[in-house]
Amino acid sequence: MPKIKVEKKSRIHNEIAKQGIQFNKDFGQHILKNPLIITGMLDKAGLRPTDVALEIGPGTGNMTIKMLDRVKKVIACEIDTRLVAELQKRVQGTPYQAKLHILVGDVLKTELPFFDICVANIPYQISSPLVFKLLLHRPFFRCAILMFQKEFAQRLVAKPGDKLYCRLSINTQLLARVDMLMKVGKNNFRPPPKVESSVVRIEPRNPPPPINFVEWDGLTRIAFVRKNKTLSAAFKHNTTMAALEKNYRVHCSLNNKEISEDFDIKEKVQQILTEAECDQMRARTMDIDDFMKLLHAFNSEGIHFA
C-alpha cells in the first residue's frame, strides 16, 4: 500500500473552522486531538488486519484514519451530516475510501451490522444506553475500547461496597468483563469538555450468563433505588408491590394456579426475602451471585419482574 501523507490535526481543524463548522455540544462533539491517546486506544484494542471495526462519533476522522491503517474495514456511525461530508472528503481518492463505510444517523436508533471490535470516543450523554445496546448486540463482538466521562467509567468498574457501586456497575459486569485502561485530561479534546475522561475496555461474556436480562434489570432497579436500605425496606414501596402483584396474578393465570382470597403480596415478598436470607442485605454490598440467588428465589415462587 502506498504511503499516505497524514495531514496535521491543527490544519484539519482550521479547515473546518474556515468553512464555518462549529462543533455541536448538543451532539457531545469534543474531538480527541492528541495522537498519543488515539494510538494508545488502538494499541489496547489489539486490532487485527482481518477486523471489521465500529467507530461511534468519528468527528473529523483523527481516529478513523489511524484505524483504517490497521483493519480490513471501518464502520463509522455519525449523526452530524457536516462531519460526514468532512470525513468523506478526507478519504476521497485514497486507498482508505473503499475500506470506510459510514452510517449516517443516531447510533441508538441504528441497527448495527456485524463488527469484531469497537473503538470510539463516544458522546457522553448516550453512554449508558449505548453500553447496553452494544452488550446486547448479536453476534458477539470481541471487545470495545471506549472513552467515557471519568465518573461514568468509575461506576462501570465499581465493586460491591464502593461508593460509586450502582445498578450500572452490576448490570454491566453481569454481561461483560470491564477494566479501566487510562485517564485522559480535558485538554486532549477540542473544544475541551467540562469533565475529565477515562478509557475503558469492555469484553462481553460469551456465552452470556443463563439469565433473563429484563427480569434481572427489573430486580436490580428495585434494589438500587434505595441501595443503602435493607431489601426488606426497598421492596415495601406501594408501586413496587402493585407491579409485583400484577405480574404474580398473570403468572398464576397462565399456569392455572389458584390464588387464595386472603393472598397478601407483601407477606409473600417478605417470606421469599427471609427464606433466601436476603431480607437484611443491602444492594450496595451485594454481588452478582447474591442477586442471581435472589432472582431465582423470586422466580421459583412465581414472582416476576418483567
Image (cartoon, rainbow, N blue to C red):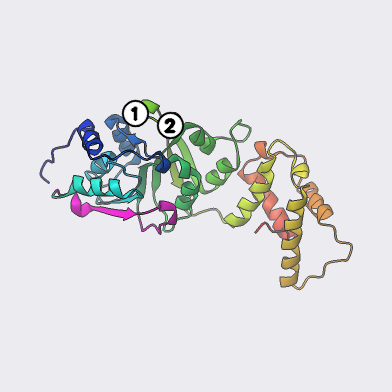
Q: Type of residue at label 1?
A: Asn
Write down the residue under mark 1. Answer: 188
- Residue 255 location (% of width, % of height): 73, 71
Vertical position of residue 160 compared to residue 187: above or below: below
184 sits left or right of 244 in the view: left
Q: Nearer the viewer, residue 178 or 127?
A: 127
Q: Residue furthest right?
A: 262
Vertical position of residue 33 compared to residue 255: above or below: above
Q: Type of residue at label 2?
A: Ser
Q: Nearer the viewer, residue 277 or 3?
A: 3
Q: Nearer the viewer, residue 72 or 87?
A: 87
Vertical position of residue 11 compared to residue 258: above or below: above
Q: Secondary structure at mark 2?
A: strand
Tell me if I can see residue 33 in this picture: yes
Residue drawn 24% across and 38% down? 16
Q: Residues within 10 Å of mark 2 (few under 14, many from 20)?
A: many
For residue 197, the mark is: 2
> Along the polypeptide, which appears first: circle 1 or circle 2?
1
- In the rendered image, the quadrant that contains the C terminus is bottom right
- Residue 132 location (% of width, % of height): 49, 50
Residue contact between numbered discs 1 and 2, judged by CB atoms under 8 Å? yes
Magenta highlight range: 94-115
**Total residue callouts:** 2
277 sits left or right of 36 in the view: right
Tell me if I can see residue 211 in this picture: no
Name the quadrant containing residue 60. Answer: top left
Q: Is residue 81 magenta?
A: no
